[in-house]
Amino acid sequence: MRRVRLTTKLLLSLLAISSALTSATLLTVRYTVERRVRESISEDLRKSVNSYRSFARQREDMLQVPAVCAAGRPAGLKRHLEDPSASSLRQRLSSAVSSPWGDGCN
């Protein structure tokens, strides 16, 4: 059997210790970076959802105003919806909601 010299044993043990420390450091850095990226993505997603909900709420509020105004004036709404000069339903609805009343229901 061949004998291993003392310097070789020392170098191999230093190499093993250095490899273990490097691996542990890389794993720690990987875990930390992954956690921060997940937190960042989670925060951005939460902000996006809040923005979308706010936008949807504002849109619903804007759509409620014409409905409330039109509901308060059924005769005017009926007259404008039956107007044969308006070519599309969109034109009929926009003219029915915006033109006959000057009370802020545009």
Image: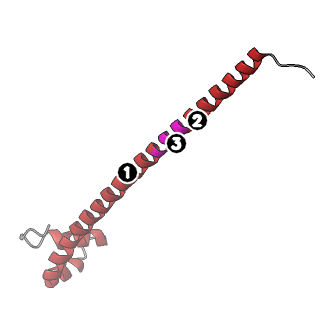
Residue at left 67%, top 22%? 14
29 falls in the magenta region: yes
Magenta span includes 66: no
Magenta-drawn segment: 28-35
- Give 57 or 94, whichever is nearer the viewer: 57
Furthest residue in direction left, as rendered? 103
Mark 2 lies on residue: 24
SS category of the residue bearing label 3: helix
Q: How packed is label 1: few (under 14 Cα within 10 Å), some, or many (20 or more)?
A: few
Instruction: Reply above or below: 19 against 33.
Output: above
x and y, in percent, of residue 15 in the image: 68, 23
Residue type at mark 1 is Glu
Q: Quadrant of residue 70?
A: bottom left
Q: Residue at image x 93%, y 23%?
A: 1
The residue to which callout 1 is attached is 43
Residue type highlighted by circle 3: Tyr
Nearer mark to the viewer, of 1 and 3: 3
Disc 3 marks which residue? 31
Identify the residue shown where x is 47% and y is 45%.
35
Q: Is residue 71 left or right of residue 57?
A: left
> Looking at the picture, how far across and down is residue 78, in whole percent?
20, 82
Seen from this angle, which residue lies furthest right? 1
Disc 1 is placed on an element classified as helix
Q: In the rendered structure, which disc, 3 or 2, sits on the residue that comes first in sequence? A: 2
The residues bearing labels 3 and 2 have C-alpha atoms spaced at a distance of 11 Å
The quadrant of the rendering that contains the C terminus is: bottom left
Position above or below: 15 against 26? above
**Mark positioned earlier in the residue sequence (1 or 3):** 3
| Front of the two marks 2 and 1 | 2
What is the spatial separation of the Cα atoms under label 1 and label 3, in whole angstroms? 18 Å
